[in-house]
Image (cartoon, grey):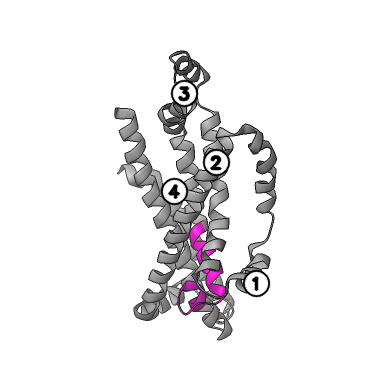
Amino acid sequence: MKWVREKGGAIFLLLFILCSWELLVKVNEVPGWLLPAPIAVFSEAIKVIPSFSTDIFSTIQLALLGLTIGSLVGFIIAVLLHMMPFVQKMVYPLLILSQNIPIIVLAPLLIIWFGFGLMPKLIIIGLVCFFPIVVAALDGFKNTASELKYYMEMAGASKSQLFWKLELPHSLPSLFSGLKISATYSVMGAVISEWLGAKQGIGVFMTLSQSSFRTDRVFVAIFTIMLLSILIFGLLRMVERIVIKGKMER
C-alpha cells in the first residue's frame, strides 16, 4: 500500500498520457509511419523482443562499463581537486567548459583518433558520466560539518585521515546523487556511441528502424532506453539505502 501511495500519482499520469496518445492517433487517423499508437508500439515490442534482446544486453554491458569508468575517473578527479584547492581553482572552470562541447560533434573526431572499436564508445559515455560525479563529490566534501573537522584536527588527525574518516563518509549522499544522474545519462551515452558504428545495440536497432521508416520500432527503442535508465536508477537507490544505512548503524 505504501508503494501505491508513493507511486500512484506517477502511474496515473503515465496511463493518462498513453490513453490520450492512443485516442489522439485513433481519432485523427494518424498513419503508423508518422506516429504509431501505444498499443501498436507494445505489440511490435512483443514481436521483436527475441531478436532485440541481444541489442538490449549489448547496450547494457556498454552502459555499465562506461558508467563504471566514468564514475571512477570523476571520483578520482574530485578527490585530487579537493586535496589541492589551488589546482581546483584552475581546473574546475575547464571542466565546466568541457560540458559545453556537443557529444555529437566530438564523436566523429573520436572515430578518427581511436577507430571504430570500444575505446571511442567508452570515452563518449565517460564524458557524459564523469561531470555529475565530480560536482556532487566536491559539494559533499565541502559540506562536511566544520565543527567535526575542527574536532578531528584538534585530535591530531592528518589530512588523509580527515578525508577517509570524515569527509568521504559524509559525502556519500551527495556522491550517490551524482551517481544516479550519471546512471541515467549512461544509457543515452551508450546509444549515442552505437550510432557511430557498432554491430549491435539499441542505437543500431534504432538507426535501422529509422532508415526503414519503422517508427513503431523507433518508439520500442525509445521506451527501452527509458526503462533501462529507470532500472539502473532504481538499482543505485537500493545500493544507496544499504550503504548509507550501514554507515549510520556503525
In the image, which is nearer the foreground, mark 4 or mark 2?
Answer: 2
View extreme (bottom): residue:
212
- Near mark 2 (Cα within 10 A), the count class, few <14, some 14-19 or many ≥20, is many
In the image, which is nearer the foreground, mark 1 or mark 4?
Answer: 1
Q: Check disc 2 and report the residue beneath it.
A: 78
Q: Check disc 3 and report the residue beneath it.
A: 158
Quadrant of res 210: bottom right
In the image, which is nearer the foreground, mark 1 or mark 3?
Answer: 3
Q: Residue at x 55, y 78 (%)?
A: 207
Tell me if residue 182 is in the magenta stretch.
no
Taking depth in this image into account, of 21 and 35 the one nearest to the observer is 35
- Near mark 3 (Cα within 10 A), the count class, few <14, some 14-19 or many ≥20, is few
In the image, which is nearer the foreground, mark 4 or mark 3?
Answer: 3
Is residue 222 visible to the viewer in this orientation of the structure? Answer: yes
Tell me if residue 189 is in the magenta stretch.
yes
Mark 4 residue element: helix
- Give the residues drawn in magenta, as a range: 186-205
Of labels 4 and 3, earlier in sequence is 4
Is residue 15 visible to the viewer in this orientation of the structure? Answer: no
Q: Residue at x 34, y 47 (%)?
A: 4
How far is disc 2 from disc 1 in space, using C-alphas? Answer: 28 Å
Q: Check disc 4 and report the residue beneath it.
A: 9
Q: Main secondary structure of the magenta part?
A: helix
Q: Is residue 97 above or below residue 159?
A: below
Is 127 left, or right, of 54 in this rendering? right
Q: Amino acid at mark 4?
A: Gly
